[in-house]
Amino acid sequence: MEALVRKELPAFKPYTPGEQPGLTTSTIKLNTNENPYPPSPKIREAVEKVLQTGVLRKYPNYHARKLQELIAKDYDLDPNQILVTNGSDEALRMLFHTLIGPGDVVVAPDPTYSYYPVLTEQMMVGATYKAVPLLPNLHFDFPALSKEQGKLLCFAHPNAPTGVEEDKTELLNLVKNFSGIVLSDEAYIDFTEPNTSLISEIRNHPNLVVSRTFSKSYALAGLRVGFIVGSIDVISWIRKLKDSYNVGILEQVVAEVSYADKEYFLEKRLAVIAERTKLKKELESLGFIIPNSSTNFLFCKPKVGISPESLYLQLKEKNILIRYFSTGISKDYIRITIGTPEENQKLLETICNFL
């Protein structure tokens, strides 16, 4: 069979997601940056209406038009500047397929979202992934990034796995001076200060695209809805690669209701941020070194003498999952998703016992 597949595929290393225990287990899952709180309670009525009316036998709206319009209204955009996708990962895949050909270069800070180098390799066209190391303080090396040339520059904003947020002016200067397309991947943007997103800057920077997801702040990771925003020209090219009906009726309706329920969204957003502040303070009192986080997770360097990998394994034995990356600067850290107050307390108690 190997002789039949593309010659590039046998050596290809796929993306490695966080561990996913069974849905009915008692495991405390703090490893994949899911929201610890349930999504909008208004979803139930909306889903029941869909089931009662029997519209699931019909194809969904091709463009997810109502959701497009809701997002466009908030950002004063043309709905055609927004492409709704099957999670933001589909948006990233389509962007890469739109841009990356033989010999092209993808530039990114390192570390950032680990799916970018995988996507570059998935193109199977001999594209190059150029990783630019972070500074010792875990911020982007803007002078080094500004010297790079490529077809695509991509970064998470705020960054992952570090949780660190970069200055908006510096990011926009990078966009302005980069010769290709720049992706601001804003999966965690809702956990930082308002008006931090670069979406409003798209009108001033035609080479800028922004991706967003409903998986994190809207607590819909199991549903798979995201979107990508850019100029009408750029989005029209990406749309050519879209699956015919990539986002189902239930997904569209649930995302619409969640997006419109601003009061509940803000309440749970603030709850996550409050727990983040509390957990960071508690871990720092135990000797952990943690950069300021603008996300729903903490990037933690354990106290001197404690191996990050051993701590990850000890917690796993106690049915608490966190994330450990074994390469680059990440090997000195663990990443902990913010859980509920009860989950965070259990985590702290288990860590104290280990220490």
Image: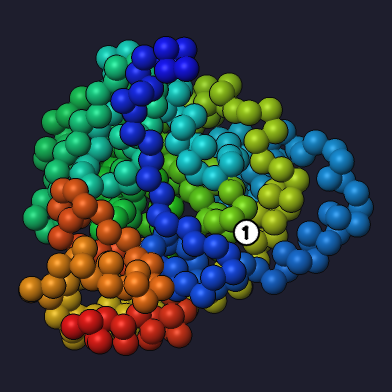
Q: Quadrant of residue 337?
A: bottom left
Who's the residue at 35% across and 69% down the image?
316
Quarter of the figure with the C terminus: bottom left
Q: Position of residue 265 (x, y in %)?
A: 57, 69
Task: Please say if 120 is above or below 85.
Answer: above
How is the structure coloured here?
A: rainbow
Q: Where is residue 9 in the image (x, y as percent from the top left)?
A: 38, 22
User: Residue 299 in the image: x percent, y percent?
Assistant: 25, 64
User: Which residue is found at the position 47% from the left and 72% from the top?
Assistant: 27
Question: Image quadrant of residue 46?
Answer: bottom right
Depth check, front residue: 231 or 14: 14
Circle 1 Cα neighbour tier, 10 Å, few/some/many (<14 / 14–19 / ≥20): some
Q: Is residue 147 visible?
A: yes
The outermost residue toward the front is: 1
Helix, strand or loop at mark 1: helix
Q: Which residue is outermost to the right?
A: 53
What residue is disc 1 on?
259
Between residue 17 and residue 34, name the one nearer to us: 17
At 28% from the left edge and 67% from the top edge, which residue is drawn?
Answer: 313
Does residue 165 sit above or below 345 in this rendering? above
Numbered label tally:
1
At which x and y percent is residue 298?
Answer: 30, 68
Please say whether residue 192 is visible from this viewpoint. Answer: no
The structure residue drawn at horizontal position 47% and vertical position 79%, both measured from the top left corner, is 340
Q: Indicate left or right for 270 with 348 as reference.
A: right
- Does residue 11 appear left or right of residue 80 in this picture? left
Q: Is residue 28 above or below residue 169?
A: below
Going by the numbered disc 1, the residue's amino acid type is Tyr
